[in-house]
């Protein structure tokens, strides 16, 4: 079986960098890292990155769902207020007593026989 040089191996760096007598001492001190260890490190790194990406996506999905439910309740409240205002508008347009009462309350209008007194506090 043909042996291929591993560019990440510490043995090839030690042999090139030092003299032969120091290379043997250095090789006994520096362990050799097999290819399957490199493969395992790459697999662990990729799986860790994908796991963090999935966790981030899950967090953002939860935030989006809570934001959607909050906006959904605001829309329902706005529709209820809109329905109430449209009912009040219909009553003001059709009933003259209600329109007179609203005019007095909101616009501070007076009736024909009313007297206005200004009280200074």
Image: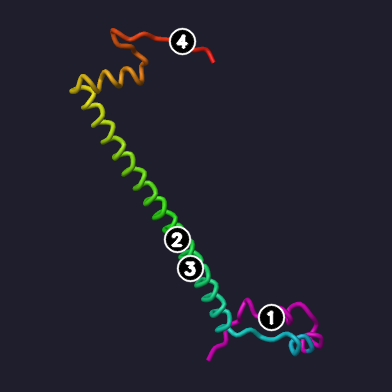
Give the mark toward the camera: 2 or 4: 4
Seen as rendered, the residue at the extreme bottom is: 1
**For this view, does 61 lie left or right of residue 7?**
left
Q: Nearer the viewer, residue 8 or 72?
A: 72
The reply to whether discs 2 and 3 touch (Cβ–Cβ < 8 Å) is no
Q: Which residue is mark 3?
A: 50
Which of the 4 image quadrants contains residue 35? bottom right
At which x and y percent is residue 96?
Answer: 20, 19
Q: Report which quarter residue 16 is drawn in.
A: bottom right
Q: Residue at x 39, y 55 (%)?
A: 65
Q: Which residue is mark 1?
A: 10
Which span of residues is magenta-colored? 1-24
- Alpha carbon of mark 4 to alpha carbon of mark 1: how far? 99 Å
Q: Is residue 36 left or right of residue 33?
A: left
Q: Which residue is mark 4?
A: 118
Mark 3 surroundings within 10 Å by alpha-carbon count, few (fewer than 14), some (14 through 19), many (20 or more): few
Residue lying at the far left of the rendered structure? 94
Pick whichever of labels 2 and 3 is earlier in the sequence.
3
| Numbered tag placed on residue 57 in the rendering | 2
* Nearer the camera: disc 4 or disc 1: 4
């Amino acid at each position: 079986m043909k042996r291929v040089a591993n560019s990440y191996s510490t043995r090839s760096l030690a042999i090139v960098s030092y003299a032969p007598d120091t290379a043997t001492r250095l090789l006994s001190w520096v362990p050799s890292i097999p290819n399957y260890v490199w493969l395992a490190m790459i697999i662990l790194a990729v799986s860790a990155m994908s796991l963090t990406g999935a966790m981030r996506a899950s967090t953002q999905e939860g935030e989006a769902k809570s934001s959607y439910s909050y906006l959904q309740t605001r829309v329902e409240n706005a529709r209820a207020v809109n329905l109430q205002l449209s009912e009040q508008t219909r009553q003001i347009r059709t009933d003259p007593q209600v329109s007179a009462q609203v005019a007095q309350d909101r616009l501070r209008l007076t009736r024909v026989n009313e007297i206005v007194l200004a009280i200074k506090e």
